[in-house]
Structure formats: structure tokens, C-alpha cells
Amino acid sequence: MGVTHPHWRLTLPHQATDAAFTDTTEDTEPMDGDDDGVLEAARAIRPYLGDLVGPAVAGMLDRRIADQFTSPANRTDMASRLRTLLEEQEDTAWFLSRVLGDKPLYRPPYHQPTHQRGIISPAGDPGLVEADRYACPRGDYVWYRPDIGTPVPDCPTHRISLTRS
């Protein structure tokens, strides 16, 4: 059986419940050396930090992540520091492992398809519809639009418009 998030607090698209988010894929260990995945997880986790670690910790953690992206460190060192940062908390470590398990797309867990045993899709059900991905032009933040009616926010680091990517 699959494992849901250990402290589920986020709402999935279409108001799915915790029971509906039972993933039957096998959990995998974090993939060492997957710099692309770690960098993408660090960009993608930022909109979810308040729900994952609580508002008191989220602001500080978001600043620490943003600082890594704006540091002069090379790509490998940056990925290593971000991995260490994300692995400090149980919930952010969970998020990182799920993003790394979605190689090569590296989507947040809430935008990955789930496989449910014993549930037959209704006739004509097209399956998961991919969420639009928006990114900061400076490369430190990504956001997935949950539905067409949700306005696209600005990058919280640079206060500039995100672009569809």
C-alpha cells in the first residue's frame, strides 16, 4: 500500500480527501546526486511551506531557501545545501523524496497522479489534468496553478511576475 503525507494538511485539487490520496507506488529513498530534482523541489516547496511546517517556521525556511538560490555557490554545492535544508524537517523531507520520485517531471506531490486500487474511473474520465507551471524568471520559485480561476502570484523573493513554463 502507498503512504500519504504524514501530517496531511493540504487540499488536493477538486477537494480530494486524505483517503483519496492513497498512493500505491513504492516509496523510494532519496536519490543522491540528483541536483536537478533537489533544485526543483526547493523551488516547488516554497508555496506549501506554511501548510507543511506551520506559519512560524515557514517564513524563516522560505528565506533560507531563497538565500541559497541567490548565493554565488555553484550548482552542485547549492543543491547539496538545499537537500540538507529540506531534510531537516520530516514534512519537507517527505516533500523532497516525493518530488525526486517523480523524475523527470519533478512535480509537487499534490500534482502527481495517484493510483488507487479497486477504483474504476468513470467512462470518459480523461484522468489527471496537468496543472500549469509558473516560474520566476530568476529561477528561485515555481508555482502550480490549481485551477484556471486562481490568479498567478508574483515571486515572493523578487516581487516580479511569474511566467508560464
Image (cartoon, rainbow, N blue to C red):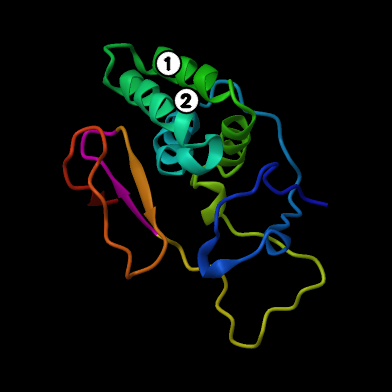
Name the residue: 74% across, 64% down.
116
CB atoms at circles 2 and 1 under 8 Å apart?
A: yes
Query: Which residue is label 1 attached to?
Result: 76
Q: In the displayed structure, does residue 67 sit left or right of residue 119?
A: left
In the image, is 74 to the left or to the right of 130? Answer: left
Q: Residues within 10 Å of mark 2 (few under 14, many from 20)?
A: some
Q: Is 133 displayed left or right of 125 in the figure?
A: left
What x and y, as percent, mark residue 13?
Answer: 51, 64
Question: Is disc 1 surrounded by few (<14), some (14 to 19) or many (20+) residues within 10 Å?
Answer: some
Secondary structure beneath dot 2 equals: helix
Q: Amino acid at mark 1?
A: Thr
Based on the picture, tell me whether residue 134 belongs to the magenta stretch: yes
Q: Residue at x 43, y 36 (%)?
A: 40
Question: Residue 121's x, y, as percent?
Answer: 68, 79
Residue 36 highlighted magenta (yes or no) = no
Give the label on residue 39, or none: none
Q: Nearer the viewer, residue 164 or 158?
A: 158
Residue 4 pos. (x, y %): 71, 49
Q: Quadrant of residue 33?
A: top right
Residue 35, label in figure: 2
Highlighted range, magenta: 132-139
Q: Position of residue 30 (x, y in %)?
A: 64, 28
